[in-house]
Amino acid sequence: MNSSESTNGRIPHPPLQGHHHYYPPPHSSSSSSSKASFKGCCCCLFLLFTFMALLVIAVILVIVLALKPKKPQFDLQQVGVQYVGIIPNSAAAAAAASASVSLNIRMVFAAANDNKVGIKYDESRFTVMYRGIPLGRGIVPAFYQPAHSIRRVETTIVVDRVSLLQTDADALVRDAMVNDRVELRVLGDVGAKVRILGFTSPGVEVSVDCTIAISPRKQALTSKQCGFDGLSV
């Protein structure tokens, strides 16, 4: 028996081997918390932008309901015949066309804005037609119209020796020489947008459809009948 056993009376245990304590990496908890904070920040931003968008829409709806914008009125008010010329073609050219027409017409349009806000008009184009045949076009430049106002704009349509086929040319010569009455049709679309507090609304379209009759002998307008979006005005 050893002296240590006799002295202490206990058998010593061998030293523990193979026990290792595991400590998690220090950055794992901070990484998860940063991801959570990032998701929370994105969610807050999304909710903020959604709230702002809904607020803007609500404000616009309130303004629209308060102002009650009306559709603009655009009408052909005056027509001035500056020149009408109908020239029968020679026999050599009769196979292709029987007559050519030259025409200068000055048209004055009246734009009425009964709204409490201004209206921005786009560039407009108008076509003069005879028996469904386009003769010429006129252009009205873009312009801005203040609230509660009437503005007059004008354009001149120049038709320079437009040749017509035999049937249409015979009808034109008969209308001009015999009846002294030539009916023309003026067609055009006018684009307009309402401006509210610096914002421009979606565009609306106003259609102009007028039938005019001119006297070649008097070089004057004899009648005018217009339609406004399909309604007589």
Image (tube, rainbow, N blue to C red):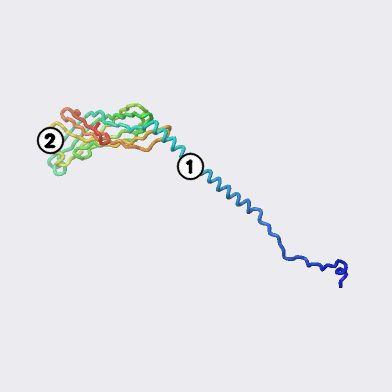
The type of residue carrying mark 2 is Arg
Q: Disc 2 on helix, strand or loop?
A: helix
Quadrant of the rendering where the N terminus is positioned: bottom right
* Residue under the point 23% across and 39% down: 134
Which sits in the foreground, 5 or 143? 5
Which image quarter: residue 145? Answer: top left
Which sits in the foreground, 25 or 192? 25
Q: Earlier in the sequence, mark 2 or mark 1?
A: 1
Which sits in the foreground, 174 or 187? 187
Q: Label 2 crowding class (10 Å Cα cut-off): few <14, some 14-19, many 20+?
A: some
User: What is the C-alpha distance between the residues marked 2 and 1?
Assistant: 69 Å
Left or right for 9, reference 224: right
Which image quarter: residue 100? Answer: top left
Left or right for 115, reference 106: right
The residue beneath circle 1 is 50
Q: Disc 1 on helix, strand or loop?
A: helix
The residue beneath circle 2 is 174
Which image quarter: residue 132? Answer: top left
The type of residue carrying mark 1 is Thr
Residue that sits furthest to the front in the current view: 9
Residue that sits furthest to the top in the current view: 149
Q: Label 1 crowding class (10 Å Cα cut-off): few <14, some 14-19, many 20+?
A: few
| Image position, residue 10 (x, y; %) | 83, 67
Quadrant of the rendering where the C terminus is positioned: top left
| Image position, residue 110 (x, y; %) | 29, 29
